[in-house]
Protein backbone atom coordinates (compact mmCIF):
# COMPACT_ATOMS: atom_id res chain seq x y z
CA UNK A 1 0.00 0.00 0.00
CA UNK A 2 1.19 3.50 -0.82
CA UNK A 3 3.15 5.10 2.01
CA UNK A 4 1.28 7.96 3.64
CA UNK A 5 3.13 11.28 3.03
CA UNK A 6 4.52 12.88 6.17
CA UNK A 7 3.08 16.24 7.16
CA UNK A 8 5.53 19.06 6.35
CA UNK A 9 6.95 20.97 9.31
CA UNK A 10 5.78 24.56 9.75
CA UNK A 11 7.92 27.58 10.59
CA UNK A 12 7.47 28.52 14.24
CA UNK A 13 5.93 31.87 15.14
CA UNK A 14 8.45 34.56 16.10
CA UNK A 15 8.88 36.32 19.42
CA UNK A 16 8.40 39.95 18.38
CA UNK A 17 10.32 42.39 20.62
CA UNK A 18 8.47 45.15 22.41
CA UNK A 19 10.74 47.92 21.14
CA UNK A 20 12.52 48.61 17.87
CA UNK A 21 12.96 50.85 14.85
CA UNK A 22 10.16 51.49 12.39
CA UNK A 23 12.15 49.46 9.86
CA UNK A 24 12.13 46.43 12.16
CA UNK A 25 8.42 46.83 12.80
CA UNK A 26 7.74 46.61 9.07
CA UNK A 27 10.11 43.64 8.81
CA UNK A 28 8.34 41.69 11.56
CA UNK A 29 4.92 42.30 10.00
CA UNK A 30 6.10 41.09 6.59
CA UNK A 31 8.05 38.16 8.09
CA UNK A 32 4.90 37.01 9.85
CA UNK A 33 2.81 37.29 6.67
CA UNK A 34 5.31 35.30 4.61
CA UNK A 35 5.75 32.60 7.26
CA UNK A 36 2.05 32.23 7.91
CA UNK A 37 1.31 31.91 4.19
CA UNK A 38 4.01 29.23 4.02
CA UNK A 39 2.50 27.43 7.01
CA UNK A 40 -1.03 27.83 5.63
CA UNK A 41 -0.12 26.00 2.43
CA UNK A 42 1.56 23.18 4.38
CA UNK A 43 -1.38 22.85 6.78
CA UNK A 44 -3.88 22.91 3.92
CA UNK A 45 -2.06 20.09 2.14
CA UNK A 46 -1.89 18.13 5.40
CA UNK A 47 -5.63 18.54 6.03
CA UNK A 48 -6.47 17.49 2.46
CA UNK A 49 -4.28 14.41 2.79
CA UNK A 50 -5.91 13.47 6.10
CA UNK A 51 -9.43 14.00 4.73
CA UNK A 52 -8.65 11.92 1.65
CA UNK A 53 -7.19 9.16 3.80
CA UNK A 54 -10.29 9.03 5.99
CA UNK A 55 -12.60 8.97 2.98
CA UNK A 56 -10.55 6.18 1.37
CA UNK A 57 -10.65 4.03 4.51
CA UNK A 58 -14.41 4.52 4.79
CA UNK A 59 -14.95 3.42 1.18
CA UNK A 60 -12.74 0.36 1.62
CA UNK A 61 -14.51 -0.65 4.83
CA UNK A 62 -17.96 -0.32 3.24
CA UNK A 63 -17.08 -1.94 -0.10
CA UNK A 64 -19.60 -4.67 -1.06
CA UNK A 65 -16.98 -7.36 -1.76
CA UNK A 66 -13.27 -8.20 -1.73
CA UNK A 67 -12.80 -7.41 -5.42
CA UNK A 68 -14.10 -3.89 -4.94
CA UNK A 69 -11.90 -3.40 -1.89
CA UNK A 70 -8.84 -4.45 -3.87
CA UNK A 71 -9.81 -2.14 -6.73
CA UNK A 72 -10.11 0.81 -4.33
CA UNK A 73 -6.73 0.04 -2.76
CA UNK A 74 -5.03 -0.17 -6.18
CA UNK A 75 -6.60 3.12 -7.28
CA UNK A 76 -5.48 4.79 -4.03
CA UNK A 77 -1.92 3.56 -4.49
CA UNK A 78 -1.80 5.06 -7.99
CA UNK A 79 -3.39 8.38 -7.13
CA UNK A 80 -1.54 11.73 -7.14
CA UNK A 81 -2.55 13.38 -3.86
CA UNK A 82 -2.14 16.95 -2.56
CA UNK A 83 1.26 16.18 -0.99
CA UNK A 84 2.47 14.67 -4.29
CA UNK A 85 1.30 17.76 -6.17
CA UNK A 86 3.01 20.10 -3.71
CA UNK A 87 6.18 18.03 -4.11
CA UNK A 88 5.95 18.52 -7.89
CA UNK A 89 5.76 22.31 -7.35
CA UNK A 90 8.24 22.31 -4.45
CA UNK A 91 10.96 24.24 -6.28
CA UNK A 92 8.85 27.18 -7.49
CA UNK A 93 6.96 27.38 -4.18
CA UNK A 94 10.15 27.52 -2.12
CA UNK A 95 11.79 29.98 -4.53
CA UNK A 96 8.87 32.37 -3.98
CA UNK A 97 9.07 32.05 -0.19
CA UNK A 98 12.86 32.46 -0.16
CA UNK A 99 12.78 35.49 -2.48
CA UNK A 100 10.17 37.21 -0.30
CA UNK A 101 12.24 36.64 2.86
CA UNK A 102 15.38 38.03 1.20
CA UNK A 103 13.56 41.07 -0.21
CA UNK A 104 12.00 41.70 3.20
CA UNK A 105 15.46 41.65 4.81
CA UNK A 106 17.01 43.99 2.22
CA UNK A 107 14.06 46.36 2.62
CA UNK A 108 14.75 46.34 6.36
CA UNK A 109 18.40 47.24 5.74
CA UNK A 110 17.33 50.13 3.50
CA UNK A 111 14.81 51.30 6.10
CA UNK A 112 17.37 51.06 8.90
CA UNK A 113 19.85 53.14 6.90
CA UNK A 114 17.16 55.77 6.40
CA UNK A 115 16.52 55.93 10.14
CA UNK A 116 20.24 56.08 10.93
CA UNK A 117 20.79 58.90 8.44
CA UNK A 118 17.80 60.92 9.65
CA UNK A 119 18.47 60.46 13.37
CA UNK A 120 22.25 60.72 13.02
CA UNK A 121 22.79 63.02 9.99
CA UNK A 122 26.52 63.27 10.69
CA UNK A 123 26.82 59.68 9.40
CA UNK A 124 25.99 61.00 5.92
CA UNK A 125 29.40 62.66 5.71
CA UNK A 126 31.59 60.94 3.15
CA UNK A 127 33.67 61.62 0.08
CA UNK A 128 30.93 60.33 -2.22
CA UNK A 129 29.62 62.74 -4.84
CA UNK A 130 25.92 63.47 -5.32
CA UNK A 131 24.54 65.05 -8.48
CA UNK A 132 23.01 68.52 -8.05
CA UNK A 133 20.01 67.39 -10.12
CA UNK A 134 19.36 64.60 -7.61
CA UNK A 135 19.38 67.05 -4.71
CA UNK A 136 17.10 69.55 -6.48
CA UNK A 137 14.62 66.84 -7.48
CA UNK A 138 13.54 66.34 -3.84
CA UNK A 139 11.11 68.58 -1.99
CA UNK A 140 12.50 67.91 1.48
CA UNK A 141 15.49 66.46 3.30
CA UNK A 142 13.69 63.29 4.38
CA UNK A 143 12.98 62.30 0.78
CA UNK A 144 16.59 63.01 -0.17
CA UNK A 145 17.91 60.94 2.73
CA UNK A 146 15.62 58.06 1.78
CA UNK A 147 16.90 58.18 -1.79
CA UNK A 148 20.51 58.13 -0.57
CA UNK A 149 19.79 55.14 1.67
CA UNK A 150 18.04 53.23 -1.13
CA UNK A 151 20.87 54.02 -3.55
CA UNK A 152 23.45 52.79 -1.08
CA UNK A 153 21.69 49.46 -0.50
CA UNK A 154 21.05 49.05 -4.23
CA UNK A 155 24.65 49.81 -5.15
CA UNK A 156 25.95 47.40 -2.52
CA UNK A 157 23.48 44.70 -3.58
CA UNK A 158 25.10 44.68 -7.03
CA UNK A 159 28.40 43.81 -5.41
CA UNK A 160 28.23 41.29 -2.58
CA UNK A 161 26.79 40.80 0.87
CA UNK A 162 30.32 41.07 2.25
CA UNK A 163 30.45 44.63 0.87
CA UNK A 164 27.13 45.48 2.51
CA UNK A 165 28.26 43.90 5.76
CA UNK A 166 31.61 45.71 5.56
CA UNK A 167 29.87 49.06 5.00
CA UNK A 168 27.79 48.68 8.18
CA UNK A 169 30.78 47.53 10.21
CA UNK A 170 33.17 50.24 8.98
CA UNK A 171 30.68 53.11 9.03
CA UNK A 172 28.58 52.29 12.10
CA UNK A 173 30.40 49.52 13.97
CA UNK A 174 27.46 47.17 13.38
CA UNK A 175 27.73 43.46 12.57
CA UNK A 176 24.91 42.18 10.35
CA UNK A 177 25.43 38.49 11.12
CA UNK A 178 27.90 36.45 13.16
CA UNK A 179 30.76 34.87 11.23
CA UNK A 180 29.32 31.34 11.37
CA UNK A 181 26.14 32.47 9.57
CA UNK A 182 27.68 34.60 6.82
CA UNK A 183 28.06 31.75 4.31
CA UNK A 184 24.38 30.77 4.70
CA UNK A 185 23.24 34.38 4.28
CA UNK A 186 25.38 34.91 1.17
CA UNK A 187 24.14 31.66 -0.34
CA UNK A 188 20.51 32.59 0.35
CA UNK A 189 20.86 36.05 -1.21
CA UNK A 190 22.63 34.68 -4.29
CA UNK A 191 19.99 31.95 -4.62
CA UNK A 192 17.33 34.66 -4.63
CA UNK A 193 19.27 36.50 -7.35
CA UNK A 194 19.50 33.51 -9.68
CA UNK A 195 15.87 32.64 -8.95
CA UNK A 196 14.72 36.08 -10.05
CA UNK A 197 17.15 36.58 -12.94
CA UNK A 198 18.21 33.12 -14.13
CA UNK A 199 15.42 30.59 -13.35
CA UNK A 200 17.50 29.41 -10.38
CA UNK A 201 20.27 28.15 -12.66
CA UNK A 202 23.69 28.58 -11.05
CA UNK A 203 25.82 31.03 -13.05
CA UNK A 204 29.33 32.45 -12.84
CA UNK A 205 28.42 35.16 -10.32
CA UNK A 206 26.67 32.65 -8.07
CA UNK A 207 29.67 30.30 -8.14
CA UNK A 208 32.12 33.14 -7.49
CA UNK A 209 30.21 34.67 -4.58
CA UNK A 210 29.25 31.43 -2.83
CA UNK A 211 32.51 29.57 -3.44
CA UNK A 212 30.64 26.55 -4.81
CA UNK A 213 32.28 24.06 -7.15
CA UNK A 214 32.39 25.02 -10.81
CA UNK A 215 30.96 21.60 -11.58
CA UNK A 216 27.60 23.07 -10.52
CA UNK A 217 27.70 25.76 -13.22
CA UNK A 218 24.56 25.59 -15.39
CA UNK A 219 22.68 23.34 -12.97
CA UNK A 220 19.57 24.26 -11.03
CA UNK A 221 19.93 25.25 -7.38
CA UNK A 222 17.38 22.93 -5.81
CA UNK A 223 15.54 24.02 -2.67
CA UNK A 224 13.96 21.86 0.01
CA UNK A 225 11.88 22.56 3.12
CA UNK A 226 14.87 22.51 5.53
CA UNK A 227 16.29 25.52 3.69
CA UNK A 228 13.28 27.65 4.70
CA UNK A 229 13.23 26.19 8.21
CA UNK A 230 16.85 27.28 8.63
CA UNK A 231 16.85 30.63 6.83
CA UNK A 232 13.59 32.24 8.00
CA UNK A 233 14.48 32.11 11.74
CA UNK A 234 18.08 33.10 10.95
CA UNK A 235 17.02 36.37 9.26
CA UNK A 236 14.59 37.02 12.12
CA UNK A 237 17.36 36.61 14.70
CA UNK A 238 19.67 38.78 12.60
CA UNK A 239 17.20 41.66 12.49
CA UNK A 240 16.41 41.44 16.21
CA UNK A 241 20.13 41.53 17.07
CA UNK A 242 21.09 44.24 14.56
CA UNK A 243 18.19 46.48 15.52
CA UNK A 244 19.03 46.26 19.19
CA UNK A 245 22.73 46.98 18.53
CA UNK A 246 21.92 49.94 16.25
CA UNK A 247 19.71 51.58 18.85
CA UNK A 248 22.30 51.01 21.59
CA UNK A 249 25.47 52.01 19.72
CA UNK A 250 24.05 54.89 17.69
CA UNK A 251 21.70 56.15 20.41
CA UNK A 252 18.71 55.83 18.09
CA UNK A 253 15.14 56.31 19.18
CA UNK A 254 13.00 53.20 19.28
CA UNK A 255 9.28 52.76 18.87
CA UNK A 256 7.30 50.71 21.36
CA UNK A 257 5.36 48.12 19.43
CA UNK A 258 1.67 47.52 19.98
CA UNK A 259 1.59 43.72 19.61
CA UNK A 260 -2.16 43.75 19.03
CA UNK A 261 -1.76 46.36 16.28
CA UNK A 262 1.02 44.34 14.62
CA UNK A 263 -1.21 41.27 14.67
CA UNK A 264 -4.08 43.16 13.03
CA UNK A 265 -1.78 44.53 10.33
CA UNK A 266 -0.59 41.03 9.40
CA UNK A 267 -4.06 39.50 9.92
CA UNK A 268 -6.57 41.95 8.41
CA UNK A 269 -10.18 41.01 9.21
CA UNK A 270 -11.93 39.18 6.36
CA UNK A 271 -15.20 40.95 5.50
CA UNK A 272 -18.29 38.83 5.69
CA UNK A 273 -20.19 38.32 2.48
CA UNK A 274 -23.76 39.44 3.07
CA UNK A 275 -26.26 36.74 2.30
CA UNK A 276 -28.99 37.54 -0.16
CA UNK A 277 -32.34 38.02 1.43
CA UNK A 278 -34.81 35.46 0.31
Image (cartoon, rainbow, N blue to C red):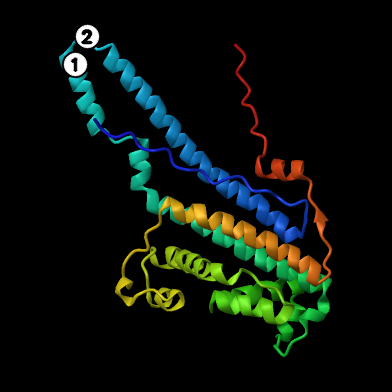
- Residue nearest the viewer, comparing 199 with 252: 252
* Residue highlighted by disc 2: 64
Q: Taking 197 as reference, is 6 above or below it?
A: above
* Residue highlighted by disc 1: 68
Which quadrant holds residue 170? bottom right
Mark 2 residue element: loop
Q: Residues within 10 Å of mark 1 (few under 14, many from 20)?
A: some
What residue is at 42 percent from the left and 79 percent from the top? 208
Picture coordinates of residue 126, whole percent (x, y)? 74, 87
Picture coordinates of residue 6, whole percent (x, y)? 39, 38
Q: Taking 278 as reference, is 191 above or below it?
A: below
Q: Residues within 10 Å of mark 2 (few under 14, many from 20)?
A: few
Residue 231 left/right relative to 134: left
The Cα atoms of the two marked residues, 2 and 1, are separated by 7 Å
Q: Is residue 142 visible?
A: no
Q: Taking 157 as reference, is 65 above or below it?
A: above
Q: Which quadrant of the rendered structure holds the C terminus?
A: top right
Picture coordinates of residue 149, whole percent (x, y)? 70, 73
Extreme residue toward the front, this view: 180
Q: Which quadrant of the rendered structure holds the N terminus?
A: top left
Q: Is residue 187 visible?
A: yes
What residue is at 36 percent from the left and 26 percent from the top? 52
Residue 182 left/right relative to 74: right
What residue is at 61 percent from the left and 26 percent from the top? 273
Q: Taking 55 as reference, is 89 above or below it?
A: below
Amino acid sequence: MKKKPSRPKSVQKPMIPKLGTTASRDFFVSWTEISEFFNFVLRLVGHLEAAGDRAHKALVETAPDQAERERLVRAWDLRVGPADQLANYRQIFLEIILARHIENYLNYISGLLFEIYTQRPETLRSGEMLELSTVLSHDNMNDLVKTIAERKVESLSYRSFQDLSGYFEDRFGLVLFPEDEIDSVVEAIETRNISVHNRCIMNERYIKRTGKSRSLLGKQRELFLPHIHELAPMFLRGVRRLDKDARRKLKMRGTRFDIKELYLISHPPIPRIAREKR
